[in-house]
Image (cartoon, rainbow, N blue to C red):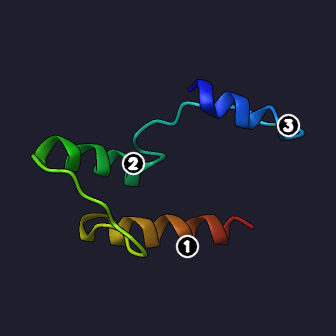
Amino acid sequence: LRPMRSRGNRLPAWKVEHSKKEQNSAAHELAQLAKRTKHSAVWRLRCPMCIEQIVAQECNNSISEF
């Protein structure tokens, strides 16, 4: 959290908020994947298959809110 605070202080305004898992289901699913996985993994240019649909849905939801 400390590195994010120092980066945030460079912005005119910012805040950190806790999100419930229902509000950020992609992060929740990634945390569950990390619990089930015994190895390290890096995804470049794509997200893991287990959250592709969630990410697409959350992106569409945020676009439609504008």
- Circles 3 and 1, Cβ within 8 Å, touching? The answer is no
Which residue lies under the disc numbered 1? 60
| Number of other residues with Cα within 10 Å of mark 1, as a class: few under 14, some 14 to 19, many 20 or more | few
- The amino acid pointed to by label 2 is Ala
Is disc 3 placed on a helix, strand or loop?
loop
3D distance between C-alphas at marks 3 and 1: 26 Å
Give me the residue at 30% from left, 50% from top: 30
Looking at marks 2 and 1 on the same chain, the residue that comes earlier in the sequence is marked by: 2
Which label number is shown at residue 13?
Answer: 3
Q: Is residue 59 above or below residue 41?
A: below
Q: Earlier in the sequence, mark 3 or mark 1?
A: 3
Q: Position of residue 40 (x, y in %)?
A: 21, 51
Say which quadrant the C terminus sits in.
Answer: bottom right
Pinpoint residue 34: horizontal percent, then vertical percent: 22, 45
Q: Residue at x 29, y 43 (%)?
A: 31
Q: Amino acid at mark 1?
A: Asn
Label 3 environment density (alpha carbons within 10 Å; few <14, some 14–19, many ≥20):
few
The residue indicated by pointer 2 is 27
